[in-house]
Amino acid sequence: MKKTRTQLLNDLQRIKAEQYKLREGEEVRDFICLMLEYIGDPQPELRDELIYPTFYEWILEQRLFSSDELRGILAVLLDERHLFHGIGGQEDDTVFTRTFTALVIGLMIHRHREQPFLDAAGFQQLKSALLRYYTEKKDLRGYVEKGGWAHSAAHGADAIDELVQCQESGETVQLEVLEAVRDMLQNGVYIFREEEDERMATIVDTMILCNLLARERIAEWVSSLAASGSQPGNRSLYINWINSKNFVRALYFRREREYFGKELQEALIAAELKMNEFTAKTILSVQ
């Protein structure tokens, strides 16, 4: 097993050095199974610097896979050994398999957006699996001292941002996504500190920019983030409060104010004020 991993490492180093081109007699299928097996390798060089960039090049740049091959790879990515590998665990290395699987799923969705290869049933299966993953995962670490980037919430957000842009993602899907994002922000356990809030804000920014969901619906959702108000009564509520406040700020400062429209802009300002005890006190003292 160690020799197999070592051979994959050596092969991908050479492929990267040669601009991801295969040599005569080599085929993509010679490498894919091992790349999927080691997609969450605990050492960042293999998973982060070699496997993921190779998938990126072959899926999006060189477009080496047929529709059947893409569907086959996606089926593996969505299985219990990849996207859901150790899904309920915390503080162990299974997190790398899940999160780097999510990144590659994002590449697959982008490819589907440009050159559809999923039918309606396949898309629904993909959507359900991705939102299930985002809801059920418990290990939310960003950077891991021994292992490098896990970035659970951020990598999942990248894939979901691709999902909302699919032509199959109507209003129902957009609303499901917003619920999943709210659940992630208000997880009650983990305060995001590795710019996960920015990556999640990108999802909502995309909805606004591409007119994927009415602004009034997004405004209602933003208001719901601040439903608990300020001065939370316990640690879990405090975590929800901090994450939600940081998210609102990340979204609000993403673009010029006119971009949001009056109702959404007011909802963002009101939510920030409600969750920011310091600003509220300052305003009250001026009045």
Image: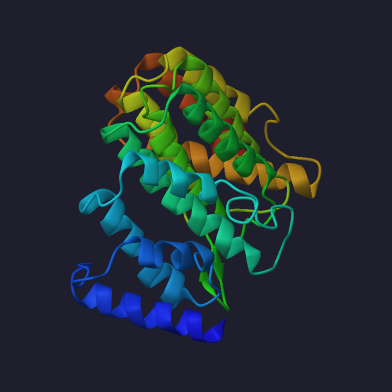
Q: How many marks?
A: 0
Q: Is residue 158 visible?
A: no
Query: Compared to 180, does 79 lie above or below?
Result: below
Query: Nearest the camera: 14 or 266?
Result: 14
Q: Answer with the quarter of the image where residue 141 lies.
A: bottom right
Visible residue check, residue 58:
yes
Residue 280 x, y percent position in the rendering:
58, 34
| Residue furthest to the front | 25
**Residue 200, position as x, y percentages in the image:** 48, 42
Q: Could you say which quadrant of the image residue 9 lies in?
A: bottom left
Decide: is 48 above or below 230: below
* Residue 120 drawn above or below residue 160: above
Q: Which of the 4 image quadrants contains residue 263?
A: top left
Residue at 67% x, 49% y is 137
User: Please, is residue 129 above or below residue 34 in the view?
Assistant: above
Residue at position x 45%, y 84% from top?
6
Please report the residue visible at 42 percent of the width from the left and 18 percent of the height from the top: 213
The furthest residue to the right:
234
Q: What colour-coding does the image apply?
A: rainbow
Q: Position of residue 91 (x, y in %)?
A: 70, 67
Q: Quadrant of the N terminus?
A: bottom right
Q: Name the side, left or right, on which 223 lies relative to 114.
A: right
- Name the residue: 49% across, 30% down: 122
Q: Nearer the viewer, residue 141 or 77?
A: 77
Residue nearest the viewer, comparing 57 with 88: 57
Image x and y of residue 88, in percent:
74, 53
Q: Which is more toward the observer, 207 or 247? A: 207
